Image: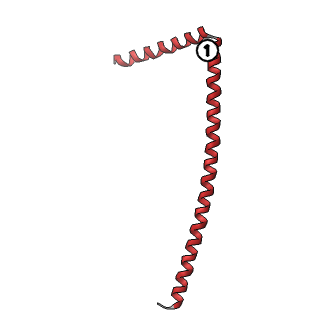
Amino acid sequence: MDVKNIEDTGKVHNLVADSTRETTESLKQQLAQLQDKLARAQFAVTTRARNAALSADTYVHDNPWKATGFAAAIAAVVMAVTMLATRR
């Protein structure tokens, strides 16, 4: 093996190492961006769910008989569907 081939091998090694470093940094940045987006989306979903739960709680406390009637109606529908499904 002559000196020229050794120098070329070193250049290729350095090129691959630089490319790997750049790719790694790029992937780290993309991962950080995705994690940030995921955190913001999770916060938004959690906030909306919490607000929906608070609204439902307020409604049930303000209208207990309507809420009870609604729950009974849902139970009747589920029971009817179950009975029809088990008959077959």
Residue furthest left in the image: 88
* Whether residue 7 is situated above or below residue 64 in the rendered picture: below
Q: Position of residue 53 (x, y in %)?
A: 61, 24
In depth, the one of 75 and 6 nearer the eye is 6
**Quadrant of residue 44 within the rendered picture:** top right
* Whether residue 39 is situated above or below residue 22 in the rendered picture: above
| Scheme of colours in the image | secondary structure
Q: Quadrant of the C terminus?
A: top left
* Residue type of the residue flagged with mark 1: Val
> Is residue 61 rendered to the left or right of residue 79?
right
Element under label 1? Answer: helix
Question: Residue at (43%, 17%) from the top-left corner?
Answer: 81
Q: Position of residue 27 (x, y in %)?
A: 59, 58
In depth, the one of 40 and 70 nearer the eye is 40
* Whether residue 57 is situated above or below residue 28 in the rendered picture: above
Question: Residue at (59%, 8%) from the top-left corner?
Answer: 65
Question: Residue at (64%, 37%) from the top-left corner?
Answer: 43
Q: Position of residue 18 (x, y in %)?
A: 59, 71
Question: Residue at (58%, 62%) from the top-left corner?
Answer: 24
Residue position for label 1: 60
**Quadrant of residue 26 within the rendered picture:** bottom right
In depth, the one of 19 and 81 nearer the eye is 19
Q: Position of residue 69 (x, y in %)?
A: 55, 9
Q: Residues within 10 Å of mark 1 (few under 14, many from 20)?
A: some
